[in-house]
């Protein structure tokens, strides 16, 4: 019994000691998570109204002339370079001659035969008619002489067949005269008109090929790079574009927001743009588009501790002013999520240049960064 009391006492003493020790310890408090900064910082680069446009010629050939230099401003439709086109010019000239030939043939059919041809056919007809009259008179006399056996049967047969031959020749002359004097048939006119249409189509194709020997600016903007020189070979499959340009009608910033801040991006957020090469005062702007998905990081700072395997969200920013900006300049972007202006109605997408020969609505190749001459 004493052992039982002793065991219970020891247990009570141990429980009281544990409770006293527990109460004497300070309560551990979980540290509060620091509030996320309001400003969203990201890296970006200056772009034009479109991304860089890589231009290649539609035809393969040797470059004859280059009309632009780097940094030059061009208008839409300006010729940037030309290929050697002597053969194409001859093909266009040949097609034009075929058009004139087909039109002349139609005009000749509508006008009919010349007056001299009509007169000749009429004279031949009257000559054959006179021959027939003479042959018939001779045949009539031969028949009378045959009754009295004044001529042989052979002579009578020869005169009869001769008169029949002259009569057939007269009918042929009559038919030729009627054919020359008859107006053109509608089906013949349709055939000649179809020949004209075919010749004009060949001429249009030749002109299209000749036009493709020139590389023209698809939009107004600045030439960023001229890769080729006169005498070089180029074409649509060239490894490098012939000319690189950008539409500088307005400037934008393409920013790359880290995945931690990506969900916070909203259209209309106010943005401040700064860079070492820009003036001291920051350029303001507004978020006008945000990519609906994350992508691989495309822009890095000079910080050696920066992670390179993160995902980013592309954000497009329209600038309030953009004079004297350099395309491709890396800038620092500070997005203020507390200042949101009304977003434009409807989704906005980065501008792309249409391909003149492609179906309606198609974009330039290589995600809008590559285009070809019309």
Image (cartoon, rainbow, N blue to C red):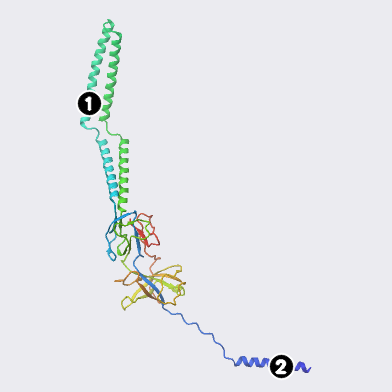
Where is 61 relative to 332, above or below?
A: above
- The local secondary structure at tag 2 comes to helix
- Which residue is found at the position 20% from the left and 30% from the top? 116
Q: Is residue 209 left or right of residue 117?
A: right
Q: Which residue shows up at 27% across the image and 9% down it?
A: 143
Image mark for residue 104: none
Left or right of 259 on screen, residue 234: left
- Quarter the C terminus occupies: bottom left
Taking 37 as reference, is 235 above or below it? Answer: above
Report the residue marked by disc 2.
10
* Sequence-first tag of 1 and 2: 2
- Which residue bears the numbered disc 1? 122
The residue at 30%/15% (across/down) is 161
Out of 119 and 346, give the one closest to the viewer. 119
**Between residues 369 and 29, which one lies in front from this camera angle?**
369
Q: Does 280 sit above or below residue 112?
A: below
Badge 2 crowding class, 10 Å Cα cut-off, few under 14, some 14 to 19, many 20 or more, is few
């Amino acid at each position: 019994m004493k052992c039982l009391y002793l065991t219970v006492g020891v247990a009570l003493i141990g429980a009281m000691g544990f409770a006293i020790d527990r109460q004497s310890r300070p309560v551990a408090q979980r540290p509060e998570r620091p509030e996320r900064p309001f400003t969203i910082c990201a890296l970006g680069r200056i772009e034009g109204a479109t991304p860089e446009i890589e231009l290649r010629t539609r035809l393969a050939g040797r470059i004859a002339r280059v009309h632009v230099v780097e940094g030059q401003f061009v208008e839409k439709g300006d010729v940037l370079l030309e290929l050697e086109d002597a053969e194409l010019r001859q093909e266009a000239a040949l097609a034009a001659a075929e058009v004139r030939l087909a039109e002349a043939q139609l005009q000749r059919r509508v006008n009919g035969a010349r007056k001299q041809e009509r007169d000749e056919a009429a004279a031949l007809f009257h000559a054959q008619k006179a021959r027939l009259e003479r042959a018939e008179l001779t045949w009539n006399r031969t028949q009378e002489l045959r009754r009295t056996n004044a001529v042989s049967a052979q002579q009578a047969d020869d005169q009869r067949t001769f008169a029949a031959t002259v009569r057939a020749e007269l009918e042929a002359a009559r038919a030729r005269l009627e054919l020359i004097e008859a107006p053109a048939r509608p089906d013949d006119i349709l055939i000649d008109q179809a020949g004209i249409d075919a010749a004009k189509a060949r001429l249009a194709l030749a002109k299209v090929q000749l036009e493709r020997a020139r590389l023209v600016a698809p939009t107004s903007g600045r030439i960023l790079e001229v890769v080729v020189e006169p005498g070089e070979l180029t074409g649509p499959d060239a490894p490098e574009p012939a000319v690189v340009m950008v539409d500088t009608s307005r400037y934008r910033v393409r920013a790359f927001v880290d995945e931690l801040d990506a969900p916070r991006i909203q259209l209309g957020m106010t943005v401040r743009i700064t860079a070492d090469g820009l003036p001291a005062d920051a350029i303001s702007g507004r978020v006008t588009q945000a990519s609906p998905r994350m992508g691989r990081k495309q822009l890095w700072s000079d910080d050696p501790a920066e992670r390179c395997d993160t995902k980013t969200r592309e954000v497009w920013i329209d600038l309030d002013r953009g004079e004297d900006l350099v395309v491709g300049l890396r800038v620092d972007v500070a997005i203020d999520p507390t200042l949101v202006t009304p977003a434009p109605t409807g989704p906005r997408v980065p501008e792309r240049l249409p391909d003149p020969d492609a179906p309606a609505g198609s974009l330039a190749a290589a995600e809008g960064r590559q285009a070809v001459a019309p």
